[in-house]
Image (spheres, helix red, strand yellow):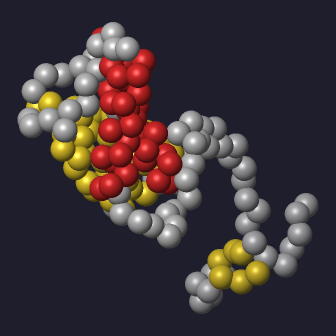
Amino acid sequence: MNLLDVTIPGEAPSTPNQRLHWATKARQTKSQRGSVARRLPSRDALPVVVQVLLTRIAPRRLDTDNLAAALKAHRDQVATWLRVDDASPLVRWLYAQEQGEPSVRIQVGLLPPRLPERVEQQEAPEPYRRASSRGVPTPNVRGPR
């Protein structure tokens, strides 16, 4: 179930490969964050644990490290909108790519609860036994031997 699905037009360039002056890169990041902030709706509260899928739509594909770098400003602004740090375990960040007109699609949805990696299995005591006469469960009055 998606709580938010919004597409932000414009490029998400791979900044590590651009070799930009720091001030130019800062302006570019500020512009990207502003674009995201203007398109995110105001909100009162969201569920505690969410999943965010950032999809870069562009004519050419990037490798995974450049994909994450290209969407860093978008991730930071979504984290600000969620009012959490972008390294918070309350948010699972996913990245994807599609070919098309340059834009970025942001989808925020509920995260299914995580199951523990290892669960100790225990035998539960049997509090009931079947009564053979009527098939109705009756309490087991005899304690363990």
Is there any visible trace of residue 94 in the rendered image? Answer: no
Q: Position of residue 30 (x, y in %)?
A: 39, 37
Front-most of residues 31 and 48: 31
Measuring from the top left, give residue 71's x and y in whole percent: 34, 32
Q: Is residue 100 left or right of residue 29?
A: left
Asked if residue 135 shows in the view, the reply is: yes
Q: Along the line of sight, which residue is nearer the eye, 21 or 109?
A: 21
Looking at the picture, how far across and down is residue 52, in whole percent? 39, 46
Q: What residue do we see at 62% from left, 86% from top?
A: 136
Residue 38 vertical placement versus 133 (above, below): above
Image quarter of residue 94: top left
Could you tell me residue 2's position as x and y percent? 33, 59
Check the image and name the residue furthest to the bottom.
134
Q: Quadrant of the C terminus?
A: bottom right
At 28% from the left and 17% from the top, the residue drawn is: 63
Identify whether 28 is placed above or below 126. above
* Camera-side residue of 52 and 101: 101
Please identify the quarter of the rendering in which residue 61 is found.
top left
Quarter of the picture holding the N terminus: bottom left
Nearer-the-camera pick, 47 or 113: 47
Residue at 49% x, 63% y is 46
Q: Which residue is drawn at the image coordinates 37% and 23% (left, top)?
A: 25
- 131 up-or-down from 122: above or below: below
Q: Which residue is at the far front?
A: 23
Relative side of 54 to 23, left or right: left
